[in-house]
Amino acid sequence: MYDIWNECLAMIRENVPAGSFTTWFEPIRPVDYRNGLLTIQVPSDFFYEYLETHFIKVIKATIRKVLGPEGKLEYSIMMDNDANRPVVVKQPSVDRTTTKNPPKQIQINFDNPENSMPNPFVLPGIKKINIESNLNENYCMENFVVGECNRVAYEAGRAVAKNPGRTSFNPMFVFSPTGMGKTHICQAIGLETKKHHPELTVLYVNAEQFLMQFQASCRNNSVKSSRDEFVHFYQMIDVLIIDDIQFLSGKPKTQDTLFHIFNHLQQTGKQLIFTCDKPPAELKDMEQRLISRFKWGLSAEMTLPDVETRRAILKRKAYNEGVDLPDEVVNYIAEHIKTNIREMEGFLISLIAQSSLNRKAITINLAKQMVERFVNNSNREVTISYIISIVCEEMGTSQADFFTSTRKRNVVQARQLSMYFAKKYTKASLNIIGEQCGGKDHATVIHSLKTVVNLLETDKQFRAVADKIEENLQ
């Protein structure tokens, strides 16, 4: 029994993030195995619900691999009763995402460590009606919290969903540092498009999956035929969404193929949506003709959400998880976890898990304890983009103004402080710092560094602002 579960854990560990594995799988204990039925014990009903909602596909694939095609899984759930003594309730494993039309082409392949979407173009006689969208229903517009940080992308996305391919937002290029909600908004646009236009074929694909599909087509015996099938497949799509386009940097053959797909879809009035961790002009090792086309439509930036938006995101996430989160806890998390949305939501799930495991209410004291451990143990990468977002938030300056040529005093000081902290907390050269801080040259960066040092020594108010920024960066 233990050997079987350990084998399951080994496979699961390879297919889920390390933090998720620690939180959701390490506490599980095997309690029985007979006749192909494995029973595992979880600490609460919430724990069971979360596993079945978020990890069902990897769990099912693991059970099939270890126990065989007829293998089954059962949960033994520790429940409290009125006498405050735990009782055991057994529940079979049930895929709770089936009612949400899960993407049928996503599959776990334990023989290939790079689990990916299978190549759809190799299916014989494929037709548009057979193409799955690969969209996650949880990433809908209703679950997207709108703030000043993402309003442009949200409003443009709604317009695109109503009239795909027929607005000036084609292509739509959404960019931001990691964890700001790019994947959510682009999938939400796809889902909203399907609501308005169910007859259209919408496809979401990560750039890494696109790359692996293209490479697989090149490895086939009939290379030209397979490549043609690859291109033909993508030319059938009405709304093509490619996430994390930066992963195609340095891949000239894949970029060339995307260029031809782009041209065909654009010329036939189809919609293209891309996401990236930087604006088109800052993409490295990308063909200029592709960069030029990325700029044809709308480039929408998503920035670090302000504290009010972070509160709203936490409340929505807690509501979706079925948890009543006290306002003081929401406020505390929003004020102390501000690196990005993904990290903040991950912290909330860990907090809920700790409450469930220890059978304790979620209180401000528990939140403080976890924030202290979470922040101290977080190996956060401080990037220039992150520094700019923190500086702009603290100084009340929009990032849109930051990258213009305006000489307003607060904007100029925001640029100077960003350069100062970029020099202090990153290994970037002065040329790179200047380039990412509004396209400034080497001499401007040197002047900014000297100005900040002088102001820190002579201006108490300026020094107080700089100290607050530095506190948020550490």
Image (cartoon, rainbow, N blue to C red):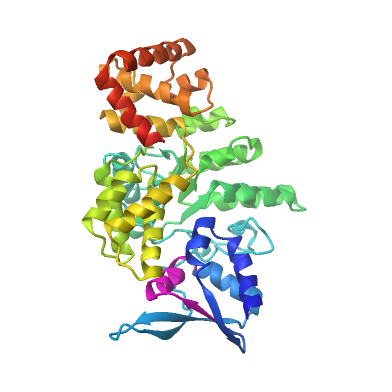
State the residue lying farthest toward the left. Answer: 327
Observer-nearest residue: 352 or 314?
352
Query: Residue 21 at what x, y percent from top left?
Result: 53, 62
Query: Residue 58 at what x, y percent from top left?
Result: 55, 67
| Residue 175 sits in quarter | top left
Query: Residue 129 at what x, y percent from top left?
Result: 49, 63
Q: Is residue 189 visible?
A: no
Observer-nearest residue: 471 or 267?
471
Segment colored magenta: 38-55
State the residue lying farthest toward the bottom. Answer: 35
* Residue 451 as seen in the image, left or right of residue 282: left
Residue at 57% of width from left, 41% of height from top?
Answer: 247
Q: Is residue 252 visible?
A: yes
Observer-nearest residue: 26 or 126?
26
Observer-nearest residue: 302 or 190?
302
Query: Residue 159 at what x, y percent from top left?
Result: 30, 46
The vertical placement of 356 against 114, above or below, is below
Q: Quadrant of the N terminus?
A: bottom right
Residue at 40% of width from left, 34% of height from top?
Answer: 473
The vertical placement of 285 against 23, above or below, is above
